[in-house]
Amino acid sequence: MKSSSESDGGLDECKQQLEYVKGSTSDYIEIVIDMNAPTMNGVLVIQCATFQGLFTSAQ
């Protein structure tokens, strides 16, 4: 997980996490942003976290 990356650069780790869980029925990604950040485009990625195995059903 990478913290405090400006949205206009440095998002490779988050992109890799998104690619990893693509098509998964039990994993998800949570991206937390600050839309009022003092950056060039006003957006700052605070957190990009992967949660695995949360939606598995008991059989």
Image: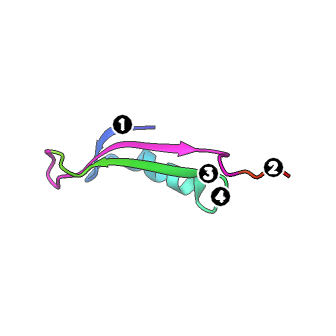
Q: Are marks 4 and 1 in contact (CB under 8 Å)?
A: no
Q: Is residue 24 left or right of residue 36?
A: right
Q: What amino acid type should be assigned to the residue bearing mark 4?
A: Ser
Q: Residue furthest bottom?
A: 23
Of the two numbered discs 1 and 3 on the same chain, state the one appearing first in sequence: 1
Q: Which residue is mark 2?
A: 58
How far apart marks 2 and 3 lie (CA) works out to: 15 Å
Q: Are marks 2 and 3 in contact (CB under 8 Å)?
A: no
How far apart marks 4 and 3 lie (CA) works out to: 6 Å
Q: Is residue 22 magenta?
A: no
**Magenta span covers which residues?**
38-55
Q: Which residue is mark 3?
A: 27
Of the two numbered discs 2 and 1 on the same chain, state the one appearing first in sequence: 1
How far apart marks 4 and 2 lie (CA) works out to: 17 Å
Of the two numbered discs 4 and 1 on the same chain, state the one appearing first in sequence: 1
Of the two numbered discs 4 and 2 on the same chain, state the one appearing first in sequence: 4
Residue at position x 53%, y 44% in the image: 50
Of the two numbered discs 2 and 3 in the rendering, the one whose residue sits closer to the viewer: 2
Q: Is residue 29 left or right of residue 53?
A: left
